Image (tube, rainbow, N blue to C red):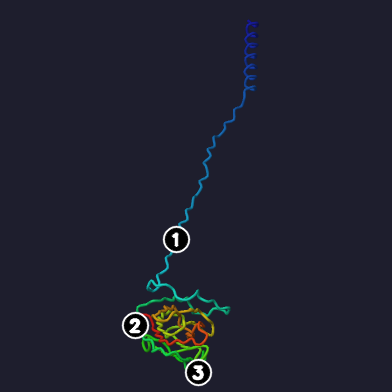
Amino acid sequence: MKDILSRILQISLSLFLLFMGTACNAEVSTPVSTVTFTPTQVVIITATLPLTLTPYPSATVPALPVIGTTPQISDSAPIAGASPTIALESVPIPSATPTLILAAALQDEDSSQSPSVNTTLSTSSLPSFNHSSDISSPEGDLDDWVRFSLGGQTGQETIVTVVLNCSGNSKLNLELIQNGVLLQGWGDISCGQPHQLLLYLYVGAPYTLRLFPAQENINLNYIAYTLSVQLAK
């Protein structure tokens, strides 16, 4: 009986030791958490460009060729308020040219400081004026000076039309001057038909028109002319 009990104990002890060894040698499995990566979102910004601005159209002018040469540029600093001008020719405007007499023009003693005309254009008082005279070279009255100011607030844009009628045996030169600085010049204007200048000017210092004959003839260059200056409506 004792032998049987002893044998049972030995078998039980062997089974216990076998179980413990198996438990110690077992691999420990560590759970691994699953990580889900979300791709970074790229924000796309679309820039909307503004529409191209179309400048407002200027005053309507007749489709006529430009007279004279390219505008002359002075070495002096530009005058504030001066703007480009447009010169037109062959405008169907009634002529008021004085009767032509080929002789040296009489001196009228005008100059840039003391012009033949010195007035102010205003829509309320004097919207236009006319001036007639003659010039000649190399003898007689070599040039004429016509000065006008513009009524209104300083810096305000004003459109001025200048209609020129002339006759003679020479061509005419015309200059637009402000504060002693040449803004633009037109050379070799042919006489015998009306010409019109459409000037975009600004209220400020007075403007001066200088008229003088082109040097074409050796003996005498004579021109009789009528100048009409008017605020555009």
- Residue 207 x %, y %: 47, 84
Q: Name the residue under label 1.
A: 50
Q: Which residue is drawn at 43% across and 85% down?
A: 168
**Quadrant of the rendered image containing residue 93:** bottom left
Graded by Cα atoms within 10 Å as few (under 14), some (14 to 19) or many (20 or more), the crowding at tag 1 reads: few
- Which of the two labelled residues, at mark 1 and mark 3, occupies the earlier sequence position? 1
Q: Name the residue under label 3.
A: 109
Q: Is mark 2 on a helix, strand or loop?
A: loop
Which one is closest to the eye, mark 1 or mark 2?
Answer: 2
**Quadrant of the rendered image containing residue 89:** bottom left
Q: Can the viewer see residue 144?
A: no
Graded by Cα atoms within 10 Å as few (under 14), some (14 to 19) or many (20 or more), the crowding at tag 2 reads: few
- Label 1, label 2: how far apart the Cα atoms are: 49 Å
Query: What is the three-letter code of the residue carrying label 3?
Result: Glu
Which one is closest to the eye, mark 1 or mark 3?
Answer: 3
Nearer to us in this view, 187 or 58? 187
- Residue 20 x %, y %: 64, 20
- Residue 196 image label: none
Nearer to us in this view, 204 or 171? 171
The quadrant the N terminus occupies is top right
Q: Name the residue under label 2.
A: 94
